[in-house]
């Protein structure tokens, strides 16, 4: 079920001409793809979840920081063929409506970006399939086609907002011309820099409150009719919006 009331009330207050949408920034895991955690998804597939649970427990207890947690987890995958990891991530399904939404954004000339605490192997696949302009994730090191067990951490739970600022500055796009979508607390910093913030199956009530619109059923096609309300996309949206309008009106 999708929430439309808050957004409609908000947009009714705008009397100025609509801004163009020029940048759409997305979280990856739990937002564009079904699995919430790519780390856990890979742990399960490689049968190292028991060891990984110990690392998570130590992190939650404050015994290790985020960077050490990432390094300990990545070490569990040492020696795994990159091709196997790629195949595992391909089995992680997209959420409904993702391809239709990205096709519209691409046709409308909107730049898209992924900012994720997940893994670059996965993000590269998604970027190639959806035509994403920029990605920033955490980088698994590979040598001779196998994971080395090491990771370079480019994104943490507290740095997503900084990454979005860099992308906006690179593209020359102000917040009023941005869309942001995510599912976790780290994504609230993305929401703060977007004229339209969408929470996708939010995992925390604070995420729900920070968003203009909440997609409870995970269908990103619900975003399409909202774009006409908040942004100026031109004639492309007019022909596409009617196809998806029903998903945004679920009560």
Image (tube, rainbow, N blue to C red):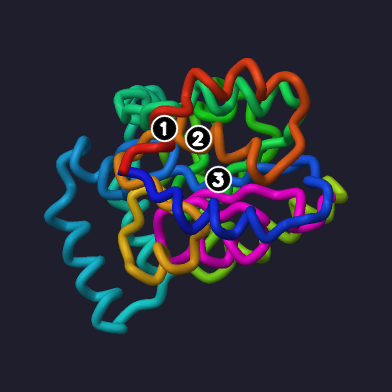
Question: Would residue 138 be visible to someone looking at this image?
Answer: no
- Tell me how far mark 2 sits from mark 1, CA to CA: 5 Å
| Residue at the (49%, 60%) spot, across then down | 211
Work out whether 125 lies above or below 114.
Answer: above
Question: Can you give x and y, in whole percent of width and height, for residue 105 in the image?
Answer: 66, 28
Residue 202 shows up from this direction: yes
Near mark 1 (Cα within 10 A), the count class, few <14, some 14-19 or many ≥20, is some
Query: Would you identify the image quadrant in which residue 248 lies?
Result: top left
- At which x and y percent is residue 228? 65, 36
Of tags 2 and 3, the one toward the viewer is: 3
The residue positioned 37% from the left and 24% from the top of the image is 90
Left or right position of 44 against 100: left
Q: Nearer the viewer, residue 230 or 179?
A: 230
- Residue 143 numbered tag: 2
Q: Which residue is mark 1?
A: 146
Q: Which residue is more in the foreground, 173 or 28?
A: 173
SS for dot 1? strand
Dot 2 alpha-carbon crowd within 10 angstroms: few under 14, some 14 to 19, many 20 or more: few
Question: Disc 3 marks which residue?
Answer: 26
Say if mark 2 contacts mark 1, CB within 8 Å.
yes
Residue 244 in picture, x, y percent from top left: 47, 24
Q: Quadrant of the C terminus?
A: top left
Magenta residues, start to end:
173-198
Camera-side mark, 3 or 1: 3
Instruction: Determine whether label 3 and label 1 are within 8 Å by CB.
Output: no
The residue at the point 67 percent across, 65 percent down is 162
Helix, strand or loop at mark 3: strand
Quarter location, residue 91: top left
| Vertical comparison of 41 with 211: above or below | above
Q: Is residue 119 left or right of residue 60?
A: right
């Amino acid at each position: 079920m999708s929430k439309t009331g808050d957004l409609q009330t908000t947009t009714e207050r705008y009397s100025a001409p609509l801004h163009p949408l020029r940048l759409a920034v997305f979280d990856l895991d739990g937002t564009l793809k079904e699995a919430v955690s790519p780390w856990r998804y890979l742990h399960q597939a490689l049968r190292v979840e028991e060891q990984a649970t110990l690392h998570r427990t130590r992190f939650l207890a404050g015994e290790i920081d985020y960077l050490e947690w990432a390094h300990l987890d990545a070490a569990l995958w040492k020696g795994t063929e990159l091709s196997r990891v790629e195949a595992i991530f391909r089995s992680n399904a997209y959420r409904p409506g993702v391809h239709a939404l990205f096709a519209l954004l691409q046709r409308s000339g909107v730049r898209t970006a992924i900012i994720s605490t997940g893994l670059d192997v996965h993000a590269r696949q998604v970027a190639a399939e959806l035509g994403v302009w920029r990605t920033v994730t955490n980088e698994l090191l590979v040598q001779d086609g196998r994971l080395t067990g090491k990771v370079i951490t480019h994104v943490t739970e507290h740095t997503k907002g900084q990454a979005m600022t860099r992308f906006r500055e690179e593209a020359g796009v102000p917040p009023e011309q941005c869309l942001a979508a995510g599912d976790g607390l780290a994504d609230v910093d993305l929401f703060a820099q977007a004229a339209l913030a969408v929470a996708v199956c939010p995992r925390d009530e604070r995420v729900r409150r920070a968003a203009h619109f909440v997609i409870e059923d995970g269908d990103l096609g619900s975003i399409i009719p909202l774009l006409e309300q908040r942004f100026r996309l031109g004639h492309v949206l007019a022909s596409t919006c009617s196809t998806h309008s029903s998903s945004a009106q679920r009560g």
